[in-house]
Image (cartoon, helix red, strand yellow):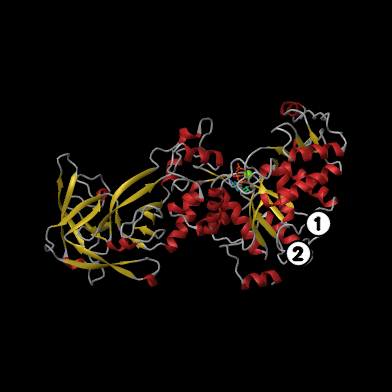
Amino acid sequence: MSDRAAARSKQPAPHASSSSNFIRAIVEQDVASGKYAERAWGGKPGPARAHEGSAPDPARIRTRFPPEPNGYLHIGHAKSISLNFGLAREYGGACHLRFDDTNPEKEEQEYVDAIIDAVRWLGFDWGEHLYFASDYFDFMYEAAENLVRAGHAYVDEQSAEEMRASRGTLTEPGRNSPWRDRPAEESLRRLREMRDGRHPDGAMVLRARIDMASPNINMRDPAIYRIRRAAHHRTGEKWCIYPMYTYAHPIEDALERITHSLCTLEFEDQRPFYDWLLERLAQGGLLAQPLPQQIEFARLNLTYVVLSKRKLIQLVEEKHVEGWDDPRMPTLAGARRRGYTAEGFRLFAERIGVAKADSWIDYGVLEDCMREDLNERAPRRIAVLDPVRLVIDNYPDGAQEECHAPNHPQKPELGSRAVPFSKELWIEREDVMEAPPKGYHRLFPGNEVRLRYAYLVKCVRVEKDAKGSIAAVHCTYDPATKSGTTGAGERKVKGNIHWVSARHAFSADVRLYDRLFKHPQPGTGRDFLEDLHSGSKSIVAAQLEPALAGAQPEERFQFERHGYFVCDLRDSRPGKPAFNRAVTLRDSWAKEAR
Ligand code: ATP
Ligand code: MG
């Protein structure tokens, strides 16, 4: 056994299985070669500067999760979070939570708080490594001056229109700006004027000076600073110029001594600029080697949801859903309220893996992961979602007794609980029919079924209301057939239905959620809102067994025969819980899709 294998066998990885992928392979190689072993590290951002920090970095690798605080985290982010924090955990490293808040306009504290909550809820911990990109604005500005002095950047005073026109196309090179070769001192003076608020928004920009003829458009002198008079959620009015994301991000990584900067594929064409910039700043003595490396992976595309912040914001603002944490939303806050589990998400991340090519994952895969996890942890309870009354004509009036139901059929160690039984019960409307089709084994006049954990009952007749629907079903029971007593199982019946005692049960709202979109790829060839699924939420007044009355917010259960449910975080009151359906017991969509 290798050292690593030995270490792992003592300390199992947090994931269910550690299947390999190309990123793990790169990390393993870098750890083995000691590529990042000699990094200086003083603990807080800034020490990556060449002249600071001396103690070697105790973390063997450093990753980061860098959300922009302009929306709530979604299921796609869970993939990135699990990947970054998971790698750090596995290889003795650290993972930073960094708010990429370089754009002053759309960022808000509400989002910062929600993101912190979601990452913590998923079960990851950044320790002391919580950072804000805006904390590096001073350094970023200093780096910009450094680039100007070294001839790697210039202030361009063309209009936005002129800049666009001279950028070229995929097949034609761009043209140099008339300002490109201006003296460095002149650019520096202008840059300072920009910083000091001497020019209006959009009057000029700072551009990297690379190559207007590059086949990669991202290398055609990209803008790195722009004038923008906007208050920032952390720096307030201090700045009226802000760095562009593509300039800021590599610097953030380098300052934090990130080793592996993982991002989604759309940044692949940005990698040459990422490297160009960091190398120039290292040459200028502002950053120390070894520099971080950017590695791209395929983003998660999941059927039946949208994972674009713009669309999620639209769903919330136009009130197609009841807020960011609506249980139908593909946000982590929504999934949590829906009853999904952090463990289920980690299982999902592990199962879908990490690849270099884009693909679609079926929503059913996520639901299966949730079922697997919930099956393990959720105690069983009884709920009648569409109640109709069952009267046992030969059961004594006023009598009651206890039946015993296991809390988890595969886990006897979880014990059982008493469920009261009496003359009048609630059963599911779909469990009784007056004139059933062939193959129906539940209640109809003359047929006998088992009331699960209780007696065999035989249907005598059904009672109708004025509209002709069944108002009650009358049965007789056989006192010699109580579950768990000797001889109870002698007579075999095909139907086995659940029930609650009408006198002991309580009524509660149960929200049945289904997929928010009815199309697997919402918005393909039309507005995504047209694909909203109108039946994605319904509320039923269910009858629940008494043991559920004390359910605590976020407690999860399997309601027998119905699926997994959670006691709602927001709408439950002490003694008056409301429940959300997380997922049905089986995938009802797979059939329809076929
Ligand atoms: P925006 O459109 O606002 O850029 P974004 O979804 O990329 O939205 P970020 O806050 O920039 O949002 O994302 C934070 C991190 O999560 C980034 O590293 C990003 O690559 C990653 N990420 C975002 N969406 C997905 C996804 N669908 N699958 C995997 N990773 C994702
Ligand atoms: Mg992004």
Q: Position of residue 402 (x, y in %)?
A: 23, 68
Give the camera-side residue of 332 and 404: 332
Q: Position of residue 422 (x, y in %)?
A: 18, 62
Horizontally, is 189 left or right of 555 in the view?
right
Q: Position of residue 568 (x, y in %)?
A: 39, 54
Which amino acid type corresponds to the residue marked 2 in the rendered image? Answer: Ala
Say what secondary structure mark 1 lies in.
Answer: loop
State how far apart marks 1 and 2 are (Cα). 21 Å
Q: Which mark is residue 32?
A: 2
Horizontally, is 534 left or right of 134 in the view?
left
Query: In the displayed structure, would residue 64 be above or below residue 411?
Result: above
- Locate residue 125: give its quadrant: bottom right
Q: Of the residues under marks 1 and 2, which one precedes in the sequence?
A: 2
Give the camera-side residue of 162 and 387: 162
Residue at image mark 1: 288
Q: Position of residue 284 (x, y in %)?
A: 85, 50
Indicate if the residue with disc 1 has its beta carbon within 8 Å of ligand 1.
no
